[in-house]
Every structure is written in C-alpha cells, then in structure tokens.
Amino acid sequence: MQLDVYSISGKKTSKKLDLPESIFNAEPNDHCVYLDVKQHLANRRQGTHKSKERAEIARTTKKLKRQKGTGGARAGSMKSPLFIGGGRVFGPKPRDYSFKINKKVKTLARVSALSYKAKDNAIVLIEDFNMEQPKTKQYLDIMSNLKLDGKKTLMVLGSLNANIYKSSRNISSAKVVNASDLSTYDILNAENLILAESSVKVIETLLSK
C-alpha cells in the first residue's frame, strides 16, 4: 500500500512511500495479539502484594472459651481467619507474573496490530526531522499541524532522538519510541500511528525475518 508523506508543518510533500503488504496488509491473528498484550501487561506487574496468613499474625493462641456447651462453634485461637484481625485465607504473596512467548508469536502480533492500524487509516507518514533542543510546545505544534492534537498518538522513529523524546514525555497523550522498540501494546493503545520515513525500513527489516 502507498501513502503520502507529510512534513512536520502538516503539508503533503511530493513523496509517496510504499508500505510492505506483508506487514501492513496481513491477515490479523487475534490470538497472537491477545498473548502479546497479556505478556506485556503481566511483565509490568510488580507482584509485591502481600497479606498475612494465620501463621504470621501476632495474636494470642490461648483457648478463648470452653470447647463445648456455649452453643457456638469451637475456637482455639484469635489468629483464626473467622475473627476480625485474624489471618487471611490463601492471601496474596509476592510473585513474578512474567511469562515468555515465542518470537514468531510476538512478530505476528505486531504485524497484526500494524495491519489493523492500516485498515483503520490511522497511519500518518512524516519526513524525518530533528529538534535542536527539547521543546514541548514545538511537539504540540507538530501534532496540531498534522491535525492530531488531542488524540493519543505513537510516533515511531528510525533511530534514537533524545530531543524529540524529551519533547513528548510531558504529554500524556503522546509517546515516542524507536522502531526497534515497537510493541503490540503501544500500537493498539494509540489512536494514530505516526511513522517517520526511516522507521518503515527498520520495521520491515525486523518483522520480515
């Protein structure tokens, strides 16, 4: 598929770029997308939740009442989960939620996500550009020129550019990543995908393996 290339001023240039059909017009695999997003979210979890079970509660184990004749259930410790302040039954413990999936599954998931964006006409191609210094206002102006202000966007660069990254990190609806760090979650989490010219070649190299 072929798309027009825009400048950061929002004007259409004379250039057009062919996006590889095998990546941007593939048949999406929803299960691979699900697994990759699930892994991404699971790997982000700290897993530091903790509650005390009855063995860890500092309360008396003195017999509370006689065993029989009270009309109630027998009780032998204030640590019991049945009492307020007692231990919790099967409470959460620190654990690692991360898991692994195959590289081919991750690749197919990213291809599927990019194909969904292409089908939704949610991809904008821009010329490679640079910023002399980090300027949030300048980044917002670029979004406004591209008529993407107020929308959740993901800008994909061909290589690391610290000034562009720093200009966007204070904007909650904007994210900038390198093409080599592109993830399925980031693609689907954005309303619009902004691809720099040089990023297309990197994406093709990574996902065509």
Image (tube, rainbow, N blue to C red):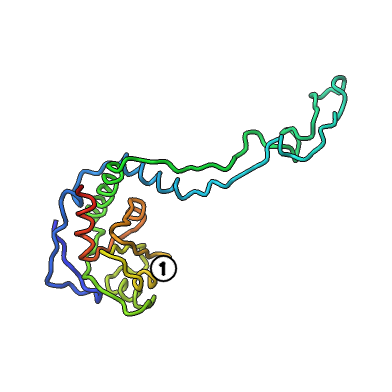
The x and y percentages for residue 85 are 75, 41
Taking depth in this image into account, of 152 and 19 the one nearest to the observer is: 19
Mark 1 secondary-structure assignment: loop
Image quadrant holding the N terminus, namely: bottom left
Percent position of residue 77, x then y: 79, 31
Q: Does residue 17 sit above or below 95 in this rendering?
A: below
Tell me residue 15's x, y (percent).
12, 69
Which of the 4 image quarters holds residue 124? Answer: bottom left
Relative to 4, is 87 on the left or the right?
right
Q: Up-down: is 133 above or below 154?
A: below
Which residue shows up at 43% across the image and 65% down it?
Answer: 172
Q: Residue at x 43, y 70 (%)?
A: 170
Q: Write down the residue under mark 1.
A: 169
Above or below 24: residue 152:
below
Give the quarter of the image for residue 50.
top right
The answer to whether residue 44 is above or below residue 151 is above
* Residue at the spot 65% in from the left edge and 42% down from the top edge: 51
Residue lying furthest bottom in this view? 132
The residue at 15%/73% (across/down) is 13
Q: Residues within 10 Å of mark 1 (few under 14, many from 20)?
A: few
Total numbered labels: 1
Q: Identify residue type, mark 1.
A: Arg
Name the spot of residue 196 as percent of width and height, x first.
24, 66
Depth order, front residue of 181/120: 181
